[in-house]
Amino acid sequence: VMGWPREIDASKKVQITVEFRHHASKEKIVIEGSCIEPLLNSLERSKELKVEIASGCRSGECAYCRTKMVSGKIFVPPEVTIREVDKDFSYIHPCISYPITDIHLDLTLT
């Protein structure tokens, strides 16, 4: 991936906290992710996440997977264009977002 931060250890694992609604109740899970894999891959692999995140392009262009990030730090390749309003309000595209730190996502706000 172009522009990858050199200080990132490829073996680093992160905790991904996800809040979501399932049958009218709010739930929270914590899953493990890798800093060298897009967040969407970790989310799709989780058997605990009882909702599906829509995705289309897997390159950050379509914004179908737009998700609210409550906290954490991600790397997005410099060639990817994310709408300024999404950046301003902490929305990310998990298909092209690589977690650098532990992440907290809120799917109830998407």
Image (cartoon, grey):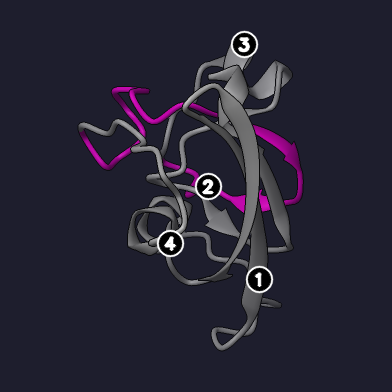
Whether residue 104 is situated above or below residue 37 in the rendered picture: above
Which residue appears at 73% of the width and 63% of the height?
A: 101
Name the residue tied to disc 1: 14
User: How far apart, in angstroms, are the residues tagged by discs 4 and 1?
Assistant: 10 Å
Of the residues under marks 4 and 1, which one precedes in the sequence?
1
Q: Amino acid at mark 3?
A: Val
Which residue appears at 61% of the width and 19% of the height?
A: 109
User: How far apart, in angstroms, are the residues tagged by discs 3 and 2?
Assistant: 16 Å
Q: Position of residue 110 (x, y in %)?
A: 53, 19
Q: Secondary structure at mark 4?
A: helix
Nearest to viewer (mark 4 / mark 3): 4
Q: Amino acid at mark 4?
A: Ser
Nearest to viewer (mark 2 / mark 4): 4
Name the residue tied to disc 2: 76
Left or right placement of residue 76 versus residue 15 in this view: left
Which residue appears at 59% of the width and 24% of the height?
A: 108
Name the residue tied to disc 4: 42
User: How far apart, in angstroms, are the residues tagged by discs 2 and 4?
Assistant: 16 Å
Q: Amino acid at mark 2?
A: Val
Mark 3 touches mark 2? (CB < 8 Å)? no
Q: Say whether residue 97 is magenta.
A: no
User: How far apart, in angstroms, are the residues tagged by discs 1 and 2?
Assistant: 16 Å
Q: Position of residue 26 (x, y in %)?
A: 64, 31
